Amino acid sequence: MAFFSELQAALDAMRTVVGDDVEAVDVPGVVQQITDEDVLALIEHASVLVRGGECVRIAGSGAVASRSTRDAGHSGLAQKRGHRSTVSLIQDLTGSTRADAAKQVRLGEALAAGLVPVEAGDFADHDARAEGQASVDEETDAGAPTAGQAGTARRPWHAVLGEALMTGALTSAQHDAIYRGLGEPPVDDVRATDDPTTDGASEAAVTAGRATEVRTAWETAAGQLIDEASQRTVEELASAARTIRDLLDPAGAELRLEQRFEARSFRRWTDHDGIRHGSFTFEDEGGAWIESIIDTALRPRRGGPRFVDPDEKARAEELATDPRTNDQLAYDLMLDVLRAGALADAETVFGTRRAGIRIVATAEVLADATEGRAAVALLEDTDTTLPGWLVARQACDTGTMTCTLDERGNPLDLGREARLFSSKQRVALAVRDGGCRWRDCDRPASYCEAHHIDPYSEGGRTDIDRGILLCRWHHMQLHHGEWRITRDGKNDFVLHPPDGGEPRALPARLARRYAWGDLQPPPRRFRPAA
């Protein structure tokens, strides 16, 4: 269906539901009176209109940016309207925040750049702001490549994202998450050659070949994330995009971590009322530790798993009835940890689960890390990527636990010796699932419970391939709401609604899947390290 025909069809459907002559102020009252099915249909039709209008606005923002470059001076489109930058003009036209206006311009520039072919290896840094290299308050806007910059090669790697946005396969938020998460390919790496025997022509050919491989890798990653977008949250797409970027470019991943490490800081100040404040900027490992400390202590208040151990259950009930807010509890906890210091009794502070971080790495990654080669691994709870040197240090400090997986990332079975999943099985489930497998749930593995998809009372085995991680809320929803989960062999788990509706697959966390090398086909030069 043509672009505007689809919008017209959605508008006609909304008129049918709400009425043709209803006033704007009467819409909320009318919607309150219609059926559940009509409410959901109304939201779907409205979303089509919103996405269509947003696509047009993004395309327009890109056109404004290309006509408001620094070279245009005071004759630029934005400047002629009394604005110093495209972002300022778009913010004024749309009534949005500056951050939203900057996003519109960024996506519009990407769309415009996707229309113009570029020379192989020439990856314009038109999204520097998205990578934190410039502030969102920047008053200048980079324009799209001009016709004079166009080459004879292919379109930029992100052109597939622009097409998906304009055809409705991606929303603007999904496009931005993938685009910013993948970032620009490592141009410096592909342009370098250290072979002294290589002449100029051969060096150019090698550089062009490497640039093509890099572009293919990024375009392949973008295409696979587009395919997954309809089944994933925006947050998961962003996380997966960052993970893929680091897997394809482990050397760049180490550089990015070093930059975040250098940016670490703690600031404290006293305001006019004499109240003391503090502000942290965490590097990756420190941030993971703080999250682990707070989450471990507060998970009973945040929907963590139900407790079998009597002492931990009593502690959880005491915490649930505590009159302090979560923020107050977190504050008091951090002061307790600071006071206790290195002599803290972990059981007294945290209960039976000790705070800490667990890193998931393949055997190849661990070998590369130990031998000093560039490598990337993941944090168990968040799928945050960590560089090889940190993996090697963690392995030296705390040791490793081996979990053997099959070619699809499934851990080996352990049989029916016990009614409940063992602690080692829970680790294996965490490695495989990455957290709650229910659609659109972001609960990490430490907040999940192991569910038997085959009831134990009916002969179900406590095997890893017949177990799945679910957060407490979704675990209770499944049992009390008569949902069912099935699995054919070691394929994806399948969720069956209680009303006989369409079953839905429950794939593993997207970033976790790509951590096992599920980016097909990865170019040889940039094959994932794990």
Image: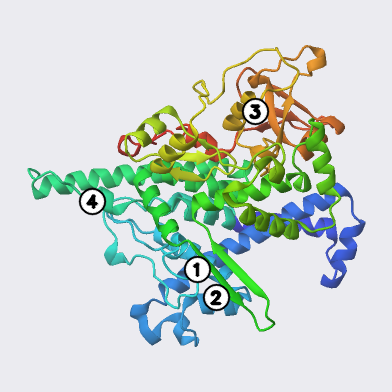
Question: Are circles 3 and 2 on residues that touch, CB within 8 Å?
Answer: no
Q: CA distance from mark 1 to mark 2?
A: 8 Å
Work out whether mark 4 precedes mark 2 in sequence or the reverse, and give the earlier one.
2
Amino acid type, mark 2: Ile
**Mark 1 neighbour density, 10 Å: few (under 14) some (14–19) many (20 or more):** many
Q: Position of residue 176 (x, y in %)?
A: 53, 57
Q: CA distance from mark 4 to mark 3?
A: 45 Å
**Mark 2 neighbour density, 10 Å: few (under 14) some (14–19) many (20 or more):** many
**To which residue does mark 4 refer?**
191
Question: Are circles 1 and 2 on residues that touch, CB within 8 Å?
Answer: yes
**To which residue does mark 1 refer?**
105
Question: Are circles 4 and 2 on residues that touch, CB within 8 Å?
Answer: no
Quadrant in which the C terminus is drawn:
top left
**To which residue does mark 2 refer?**
90
Q: Position of residue 339 (x, y in %)?
A: 64, 56
Work out whether mark 3 precedes mark 1 in sequence or the reverse, and give the earlier one.
1
**Front residue (pair 335, 88):** 335
**Front residue (pair 81, 316):** 316
Q: CA distance from mark 3 to mark 2?
A: 50 Å
Mark 2, secondary structure of its residue = helix
